[in-house]
Image (spheres, grey):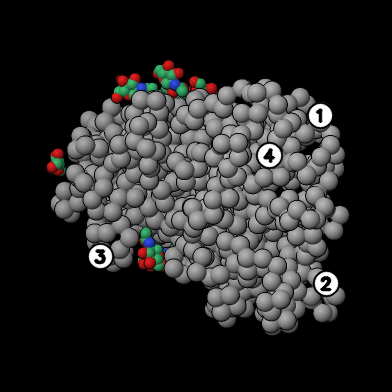
Amino acid sequence: MGLAANLRILAVLLCLAAAPPPVSANSLKTFTAKYGAFDDNTLFATTPASLIGRDALQVTPDTISDIINLTNQSGRVLLKQPFKLWKGPNNNSSSSDRVASFNSSFLINIFRINNNPAGEGLAFVLVPDTNLPNNSSGQYLGLTNSTTDGLASNRLIAVEFDTFKQDYDPDDNHVGLNINSVESKKAESLNQSGIQLSPTGAKFYNVWVEYDGVKKTIQVYIIEQPEKDGATPPRPDSPVLEEALDLRGVVDQISYFGFSASTGNTIELNCVLRWNLTVEYFSDDNGPLIKILLGVGLPAVAVAVAAAVAVAYYRRRKKRSMPINILGALKSLPGTPREFEFKDLKKATNNFDEKNKLGQGGYGVVYKGLLQNEGLEVAVKWFSRGDLKDQGDFLAELMIINRLRHKHLVRLLGWCHKNGKLLLVYDYMPNGSLDMHLFSDSNSKPLSWNLRYNIISGAASALHYLHNEYDQRVVHRDLKASNIMLDSNFNARLGDFGLARALDTEKTSYTEAEGVLGTMGYIAPECFHMGKATQQSDIYAFGAVLLEVVCGLRPGTKVGGFQFLVDWVWYLHREGRLLDAVDKRLGEEYVVEEAERVLLLGLACSHPIASERPQTQAIVQIISGSVAVPHVPPFKPAFVWPSMPMGLEDISQATTTMTNTTSFSISTSNFGTGSTSQYVSRDSNFNLV
Ligand SMILES: *[C@@H]1O[C@H](CO)[C@@H](O)[C@H](O)[C@H]1NC(C)=O
Ligand SMILES: *[C@@H]1O[C@H](CO)[C@@H](O)[C@H](O)[C@H]1NC(C)=O
Ligand SMILES: *[C@@H]1O[C@H](CO)[C@@H](O)[C@H](O)[C@H]1NC(C)=O
Ligand SMILES: *[C@@H]1O[C@H](CO)[C@@H](O)[C@H](O)[C@H]1NC(C)=O
Ligand SMILES: *[C@@H]1O[C@H](CO)[C@@H](O)[C@H](O)[C@H]1NC(C)=O
Ligand SMILES: *[C@@H]1O[C@H](CO)[C@@H](O)[C@H](O)[C@H]1NC(C)=O
Ligand SMILES: *[C@@H]1O[C@H](CO)[C@@H](O)[C@H](O)[C@H]1NC(C)=O
Ligand SMILES: *[C@@H]1O[C@H](CO)[C@@H](O)[C@H](O)[C@H]1NC(C)=O
Ligand SMILES: *[C@@H]1O[C@H](CO)[C@@H](O)[C@H](O)[C@H]1NC(C)=O
Ligand SMILES: *[C@@H]1O[C@H](CO)[C@@H](O)[C@H](O)[C@H]1NC(C)=O
């Protein structure tokens, strides 16, 4: 899979950076993006009922449970970045008659369940904001509601794919152009094209919506795509719908692109599986690239770094040069990670000498190196390429990591990317990783209590930072003692944060753990169901680290007749002899009150129900002693899925739902040919997805 297949953040940046020369004097530009796996939902604004999961935009829910109902739902998923569609200071500028053109092509699946009648429809939209009107289900398609339908103040256009006949509709299988109303300005039945939008069984349709801002026409094309993952068929020659349309006077000058959908008494799943978007847009003349990027909501340094990565990457691939001023601006930013030459890293590590090997992790091998010119010791991580899902992913992830600066995170100095080789250069951590010290052979001196407490405290503050950084919260995903590095003063430095996502999800540390029982204890129970790391699953892993630091035992240690360390500690807590858990090698050399605090906190973080775990803010306060440890019940609570009540965050994360009774999880996006739905019950061995 190449860059083109899987673009996401980096891709957007790349495309912006690589936009062709402006059409008219430095103001009309082109944005291009191709979205496929949709596993970076930071690019999209979603309304509560929508979610991004199973490699698709699920514009209305695809999961049923006691709390999620497929009937009477509505949702929108929009690209967070809006576009300026014509020039001039106001809506009616006569300085140019030019309106931005756009082309949008997407693969959709509108799935009706159990062959029941479908309803109501899915639409491609251009809207003024990311809000969903109240009561926009049923006939309103997530576009309007009974109060607002038809009002010019809606300022929206939509191309609807309607599967439910209202009085004003031609039938229950049509495409329509909607302007401020769900009553289409023009509608065409798809029967004569041999297309049934929501047939029995899953069908995939590729749609093209093309707007010509010179001629001011909109055209819609549609064709069946036999296989979800197959090649996109060529666009048909004739549109199924064509209409004159001047966007000015209808939509806002600055508008958002995306999708909306609804269900009513009858239901369907509304999925978008691929989306290509090319939009011309007008940018203000005096703030080209950086300003646009900031529109995506990234801080300047991150943007600059990302652009640098993108530019470097792009240049490698396409040998096309970038405007000098952008590169110049990037170079002048202090402290930003930089690109290294492979030959320099080779030299620094003595040709990746086995003797310089510091360790080998899931993602590759780490070597110690010495950068001759700077006299700087570094750790060079060479990623084994087979593990990488996509280089674009990797670099996108790198971009996020680059933004993060904290004294308890391992500092990233730069990267190197050459001929498929991917290397990251970090600060060298002279004291290795925490596990090396906790589990070193019995001869060596055990890590002192003060150091342990200090490490816990540092790691907690780093995790708090990750979870609360900027608008986009970062999940570590692979917290464990071997990822907590120690600097020369034995301060904790988290490493490897966020990287799991850049790797094939099948191969993240969760499933990787199968072969390595020791890491099993770090994985929160819900992860086996959601297959997805969350902040709460990070907290669970942190709890496992807390216990292991105090007990000096790995989370997967069989102890006291228990399979996992946490169960033993919970037992000791119940028996009123919690301190028996403290690492014997410490003897009496520890602070009783602190040890109790950390053990109880470790148990609280290990709560099987994700929503019951403390958050990082509380964890930091508890460790500092400013807040009391939460009450820990004597028996470990049972795991219930989903935990009730489910917060919005959980809903947006959960792709599969399990309740006390039964629930269905249905995904059209994942349908190959055969499977249609999954029936899951509490007794079914938790064997999901
Ligand atoms: C879900 O929809 C059904 C009808 O299909 C309705 O009877 C039920 O009350 C709804 N549940 C909720 C929680 O809205
Ligand atoms: C365009 O006009 C609408 C309503 O007339 C107004 O709400 C909107 O803010 C205007 N946009 C600009 C950019 O002036
Ligand atoms: C803007 O143009 C539209 C039609 O193009 C017109 O109806 C409207 O009155 C104009 N508004 C102003 C403020 O000129
Ligand atoms: C949209 O597609 C048409 C047909 O392929 C092409 O002529 C036009 O230039 C495209 N417009 C944009 C904005 O890419
Ligand atoms: C998006 O564009 C790529 C080529 O750039 C093409 O292979 C793919 O089929 C397109 N996808 C859709 C949904 O149109
Ligand atoms: C329709 O949506 C608007 C906001 O977009 C809201 O103010 C109004 O109350 C809604 N009408 C109904 C019937 O919910
Ligand atoms: C939608 O309804 C809720 C409560 O019913 C209200 O708080 C909210 O302001 C409404 N939103 C709009 C846009 O009217
Ligand atoms: C939807 O409309 C109903 C009645 O029309 C109203 O009672 C309800 O509060 C509305 N819901 C929201 C979220 O506005
Ligand atoms: C198209 O076919 C559907 C289902 O066969 C039917 O309900 C509908 O009336 C047809 N539409 C037209 C315009 O004939
Ligand atoms: C869906 O909403 C409509 C209109 O508000 C209502 O009549 C109907 O009972 C609702 N259906 C369900 C299943 O809740």
| Residue type marked 1 | Glu
Q: Nearer the viewer, residue 684 or 475?
A: 684
Q: Nearer the viewer, residue 579 or 238?
A: 579
Position of 581 with respect to 223 (left or right) is right
Mark 2 — residue? 376
Above or below, 309 relative to 494? below
Q: Residue at x 25, y 63 (%)?
A: 236
Mark 3 — residue? 237
| Residue type marked 4 | Leu
Mark 4 — residue? 547
| Residue type marked 3 | Asp
Above or below, 195 relative to 144? below
Q: Is residue 503 visible?
A: yes
Q: Measure the C-alpha gap from mark 3 to mark 1.
A: 76 Å
Residue 93 horizontal/vertical position (percent):
56, 51
Mark 4 vs ligand 1: CB below 8 Å? no
Q: Measure the C-alpha gap from mark 2 to mark 1.
A: 41 Å
Mark 1 — residue? 593
Label 2: which secondary element: strand
Q: Residues within 10 Å of mark 1 (few under 14, many from 20)?
A: few
Q: Earlier in the sequence, mark 2 or mark 3?
A: 3
